[in-house]
Image (cartoon, coloured by chain):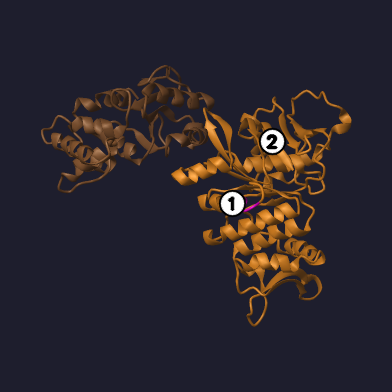
Chain colours: A orange, B brown
Amino acid sequence: MLTSLHIKNFRGFRDLELEPLKRVNLLTGQNNTGKTGVLEALALLLDDQTKGLRGNLPNLFRTAGGDWIETYWKWLFFNKNQQNNIKIEAVLDDGNPFGMILQGAQAPIDFHPEKFAPAGDMGGIPCFLTFGKGHAGHKPAIFSTHPNNPVQDAIDYNRVILKRRKKEVEGLLRKIEPRLESVEALQTGQGQSSTPMIYADLGLSEMIPVTQLGQGFSRLLDIYSEIVAADARVLLIDEIENGLHYSILPVIWKGLFLAAKEFDVQIFATTHSWECIMAADAAARGGENYDLALIRLDRVAGDIKATVMDDKVLATAKELKWEMR
Amino acid sequence: MGDAMKFVFCEGKDDVAVVRELAGHLQLDLRVEAYSGKNNLSLFLESLQKRPEFAQQHVQSMAILRDADAGAAAAFASVRDVLRRHRFPCPLADATFSDSALRVGVFIVGVNGCGMIEDVCLQSVCDRPEFTCVDEYFNCIAQKSSRSRFSPKAKVRVWMASHGDFEFHVGKAAEAGYWPWESPAFDPLKNFLRGL
């Protein structure tokens, strides 16, 4: 688990420190303060190139277009100044730091050449260096606000079935859809039109593709599948409350905390919702240890600073009805 | 959220109501809030630093009001210690402000170095002829019972009970317009609030 994160010269962050991190980390703050930027920094840091996140970074949480190099990559550097290297560093709970450096085109190369990752997947502009002992399998999983890929979701859900955690996931999903009897990954159709899809049994005449249910259902299914059956250890979730009614947030957070602990998964999620924050707070108070950090990004004198809030601060804020987002 | 915000933090709801009404009378744009008791001040200040207004440096000045209780000096020292513990700027004396980017003031509420907001409010009406009735009432109680010490809150309630549409708390009474803000009893607090 990551216990701290230090981001330098990345996007809007000149020098941002997030500490202490917890099992669940909720990022909040006004628009354009860099909440999604923190998720992108983590994707850059934790990608081991098996998932190709670095190469696809422009489309992980955003929609990039045109000349990626001009419209996206150069803007990864603080103030678009490629003279200053991007440095993203984290510390694991065993005390070991690790990190990555993204060099601008004109930056001096003074690191060991064997540590360079191929530059091709970065559009030929910057190149990667890594340092420390590595992230020890802290593979990330991305949950953006983009529509899910139903075929990939079905593949992921098959892993849930294989690992015999189907009933558990169904139980969690039943909290938001009480009619749910079962969730199945089925392959219908013939020939090339045959693709796996997830179907939900709601007691109707036929099972219904989950793509036809609300976004909240399929998103939650995706998240639970990733926690329960995939190899990801760090979930990066943009706007976690998207598509979810406020009244079910307490149940969802309770399920997420329990699952995250059981499967040793760390969650970083952005939110604008106070109800979401309070639901996470309540779930955290129900656990053995308060394992939630609320992190607000503030713009201060042209810079972005992080304020990390713990259980005491959130209790005071709740009692005195303070606005902390 | 605008710049140059000014906050006043009071011990309880009654103080908040009195200060809010007084600030309105003085046409001062202050945000008056409670910190829910002197024992809660430390946790309050620790959390306060995390509020967006403070973290984003929108606050120009803030004041901590605390009851003098048995002694203003001890009360001031207590507030000063808590401010320092949480790395807030701290004024050198009661009813003054720190010389810092975030101006911080401390005002100890009471009369003649002790007491609370009720004492100040009572002092503002004690020169009225009918107020002698309140004193006589408590003298009478003292003579005919074993009780001899009466809190300012009790005196406020008796005073307020003598009014037709009475309110039992100084805060409610302030909102109902019972306290004469022009009384010299409020001058120290008025001067402090104007300096915020």
Cα distance in 3D space between marks 1 and 2: 21 Å
Task: Tell me the element at label 2.
Answer: strand
Q: Position of residue A139 (x, y in %)?
A: 78, 47
Name the image quarter holding the N terminus of chain B: top left
Tell me which residue sits at (63%, 69%) in the image.
A174
Q: Position of residue A309 (x, y in %)?
A: 57, 39
Magenta span contains residue B157: no
What kind of residue is marked 1? Ala
The magenta segment: A282-287
Q: Is residue A202 above or below residue A22?
A: below
Give B171 or A20, whichever is nearer the viewer: B171
- Residue annotated with mark 1: A280
- Name the chain under label 1: A
Is disc 2 on the same chain as disc 1?
yes
Q: Position of residue A169 (x, y in %)?
A: 70, 65
Q: What number is the disc on residue A5?
A: 2
Q: Which one is closest to the eye, mark 1 or mark 2?
A: 1
Tell me which residue sits at (84%, 33%) in the image.
A116
Quadrant of residue B127 in the image? top left
Quadrant of residue A117 in the image? top right
